[in-house]
Amino acid sequence: MEREALDQVRRFNRLVSRRIGALEDSYLARGRPLGQARLVWELGAAGGLDLQHLRAILGVDSGYLSRLLRALEEQGLVETSVKSGDGRARVVSLTGAGIAEYRAYEALSDEQAGGVLAPLDAQRRTRLVQAMGEVERLLRAASIDLSLEDAQSGDARHCLQSYYAELAERFENGFDPHAVANFEPSEMTPPKGWFLMAREEGLPVGCGVLKRLEEDVGEIKRVWTAPAARGLGVATAIMDRLEALAAEAGFAAVRLDTNGALVEAQAMYTRRGYHPIPRYNDNPYAQHWFEKAM
Amino acid sequence: MEREALDQVRRFNRLVSRRIGALEDSYLARGRPLGQARLVWELGAAGGLDLQHLRAILGVDSGYLSRLLRALEEQGLVETSVKSGDGRARVVSLTGAGIAEYRAYEALSDEQAGGVLAPLDAQRRTRLVQAMGEVERLLRAASIDLSLEDAQSGDARHCLQSYYAELAERFENGFDPHAVANFEPSEMTPPKGWFLMAREEGLPVGCGVLKRLEEDVGEIKRVWTAPAARGLGVATAIMDRLEALAAEAGFAAVRLDTNGALVEAQAMYTRRGYHPIPRYNDNPYAQHWFEKAM
DNA sequence: TCCATTATCTGACTTTAGTCAGATAAAATG
DNA sequence: CATTTTATCTGACTAAAGTCAGATAATGGA
């Protein structure tokens, strides 16, 4: 890595950690330790969460979280209840007072953001906002992890169902996954196929499937990016990895089909060197068929 | 402030504070609490510091700092000695082991920076580095404070001396402040004049002077930006403020002179609407004279 | 039904960070 | 030279953050 680039990143980290540290202190202004404030913040943003999830987000011990919740309960800001469907687990949500408190934290946050922008003129303000957006996108992009996973896991099914739901919305005549041949999990499990998951900080943000179509021909299917992660290059990363996987598996070519409604997908396939071929399957939703030599 | 801009800043703060928080934790990997690690870091970067200065940098209580130092002394990383010239004060510096430890922290820092860049391709890496530079510059620019101060304070004299030293270096025949008329502090003190200081997080990063030249004509002098703060718009901000001050003081015009070696300065004056006028003083170093109506 | 597992809670800790009131000694001031 | 100020240190605190070993109760199979 070039020295200059490393130095820029280090300077950035240093400056920003100082400034953000100073900002975080302002949350103390509401007379509550940061741990508690963070909890109010997360609950406000998410609406209501089960403790397991909350613990994962905050990265705290269960004993510690329990105590934080007790403290906030005493302040009348949160209420916990047994999770419906599992009597061991609990869910927390903000009370009316808690929501008011969350709004106060939000106002503080707005004030901070305003304080950063206020000293700048309109032009520099725009530049700062744009540069922050760019840094945000690229930092997120850099933290995307790809890995082959079990297509039957909860996360995997969640991705696939989100994908199907989106197709149902975008296709003119809806979408029924059962109408498509070979949609079962076994088709996405070696040796028949591979299910690739994209995660950002552990959260699933995309998926893709490579399957064996013929002895030396693979097929790429169900490449999807969660709406919250679009613009980060997730789909491109998934395609890169699936094609690498196909080459590794010894496929001479990979094929894929797509629907006319998925304009961005077609553009991407073309950009990646896929070329149109005649219909190679009976997918009722497919209108275009592509192939790329490995 | 527009909602969208505020949201971008908030998203940025949120993302970055999480990521940077995670980075800071890695400093704990060396088995030392963050407070101690920060001290090693500051000492390594500065070489050696007196406690007063160190306390200002870290923003800690003298008792706390004393304990931190004791702990690092026990680890053999720092040594303190009486400051020469003042038997009360002390200076700290890293020992050989301390320097080794500092290098280890630096290596960690490099590793982190590399970890951020590594997952990105060359093009996105460049974009990230550039965007980080932009954010850094603009955040710093936003934190510049201007205020009228006493021209005789230590900080003020430090700025002026740095300015004179720079002129001595850049002018073909050197520079001697005593050769210039009216360089005494009283000339920069109301009602004869005003000394404006620019600070970034309390540290002086620039200055400028407005003085009364004639009944209704002001003169702007000694506009200087510290090398570490160039590119942040400090000089522009100083000029803006000095001109506003001049208008407020009832001057109909302000004049200034400059040396041919200060190319950027001349460009700035022209950009700001100053136009050349005949010599109006006997400054031996001046080669160009400008004026701008208020 | 029994037993291992899971989710949360409680009590008893430790470490870190930070504050505050003197104590001590050198330096500056009159 | 006496007095005040300054720089640092020490002891005695507190609050926050975090850890760990059970305790308790619900769940999910065998």
Image (tube, coloured by chain):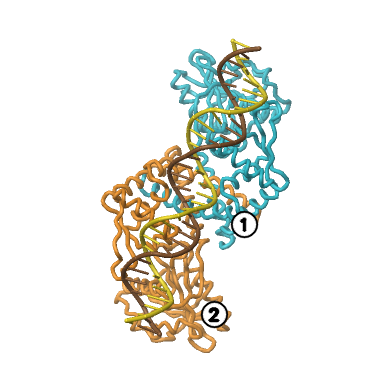
Chain colours: A orange, B cyan, C yellow, D brown
Q: Chain of mark 2?
A: A
Relative to B168, B266 lies left or right: left
- In the rendered image, which quarter is residue D25 located in? bottom left
Asked whether A236 or B253 is in front, the reply is A236
Element at label 1: helix
Do we see residue A96 in this rendering?
Answer: yes
User: In the rendering, at what x and y percent does residue A138 appear?
Assistant: 51, 58
Residue corresponding to mark 2: A246
Q: Residues within 10 Å of mark 1 (few under 14, many from 20)?
A: some
User: In the rendering, at what x and y percent does residue B281 appear?
Assistant: 61, 16
Element at label 2: helix
Q: Chain of mark 1?
A: B
Asked whether B57 or A193 is in front, the reply is B57
Instruction: Establish if B268 lies above or below A222.
Output: above
Does the CB distance between marks 1 and 2 fall below 8 Å?
A: no
Real-space Cα distance between discs 1 and 2?
A: 32 Å
Instruction: Establish if B49 lies above or below B222.
Output: below
| Eye-nearest disc, 1 or 2 | 1
Give the residue type that dot 2 points to: Ala
Instruction: Establish if B42 lies above or below C26.
Output: below
Give the residue type that dot 1 points to: Glu
Residue corresponding to mark 1: B111
Discs 1 and 2 carry the same chain letter: no
Tell me the quarter of the image containing the N terminus of chain B: top left
Relative to A118, B181 lies left or right: right
Instruction: Establish if B62 lies above or below B116.
Output: above
Asked whether A31 or B228 is in front, the reply is A31
Q: Residue at x 45, y 72 (%)?
A: A207
Label of residue B252 in the image: none
